[in-house]
Image (spheres, grey):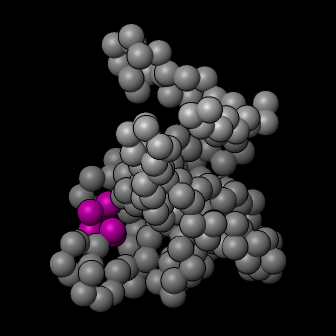
Amino acid sequence: MAGHEFFEPADRKRPVADPTAADPLAAEEPRPSCDPAFRHGVVVGFDGSTSSERALAYAIGMAHRSHSGLIIVHVANRLPTTVWAGCEPPVFVDVPDHRTEVLGLELACADYLAEVPWILVERGGDICHELEEVGREYEADAIVVGSTHGIVGRIFGSVAGRLAKRAQRPVIVIP
């Protein structure tokens, strides 16, 4: 026997992409449509840092004043891991960091979020791209982010600066 087969539960099976398809991205599962209650809401990037907490506080006030929903976005870090299954070539797999679950529990217990309807959206990938993508999906009125402090932001460019250059909607940067 060359290997072992591990069967997944029926609810976890995903359709396999057609290798003969012209566009490999067309085979991806479409994202579910967003909740209409949050359409034209306020998108805020949140990772639990001090600057993102300030951005969240500002976004809560903005959503409360405009009587709209708050879309809290956490772009999860994905850790590339190599998986080698004997004679098969190595495969890179994204391993979630589970930080979104912790942030979700903290936000669910927060009293200051009782004033506005809110949802937490987890994405993986480039922070700027994902924030703009969520903003587009929800037709957001604005995207609120905290400023980046430190040497990493100076070397690679801050998320706020990159987002402000490419976004198709207003970007509010909170110091």
Classify residue 63 by image quadrant: bottom right
Classify residue 148 by image quadrant: bottom left
The majority secondary structure of the magenta stretch comes to helix
Whether residue 45 appears in this view of the structure is yes
Q: Is residue 27 shown above or below 148?
A: above
Name which residue lies at 70% across and 66% down: 101
Q: What segment carries the magenta color? A: 159-164
- Residue at the farthest left position: 155
Name which residue lies at 39% across and 45% down: 90
Whether residue 132 appears in this view of the structure is no
Name which residue lies at 70% across and 38% down: 6
Classify residue 108 by image quadrant: bottom right
Q: Is residue 117 shown above or below 51?
A: above
Q: Is residue 43 shown above or below 102?
A: above
Quadrant of the image for the N terminus? Answer: top right
Quadrant of the image for the C terminus? Answer: bottom left
Q: Is residue 14 left or right of residue 139?
A: right
Work out whether residue 99 or residue 50 is closer to the camera in this orientation and state it. Answer: 99
Q: Is residue 130 magenta?
A: no
Q: Where does residue 47 sit, x and y in percent of width and height?
A: 53, 74
Name which residue lies at 35% across and 18% down: 23
Q: Where does residue 95 sit, x and y in percent of width and height?
A: 54, 58
Work out whether residue 15 or residue 110 is closer to the camera in this orientation and state it. Answer: 15
Work out whether residue 75 or residue 138 is closer to the camera in this orientation and state it. Answer: 75
Q: Where does residue 34 sit, x and y in percent of width and height?
A: 64, 39
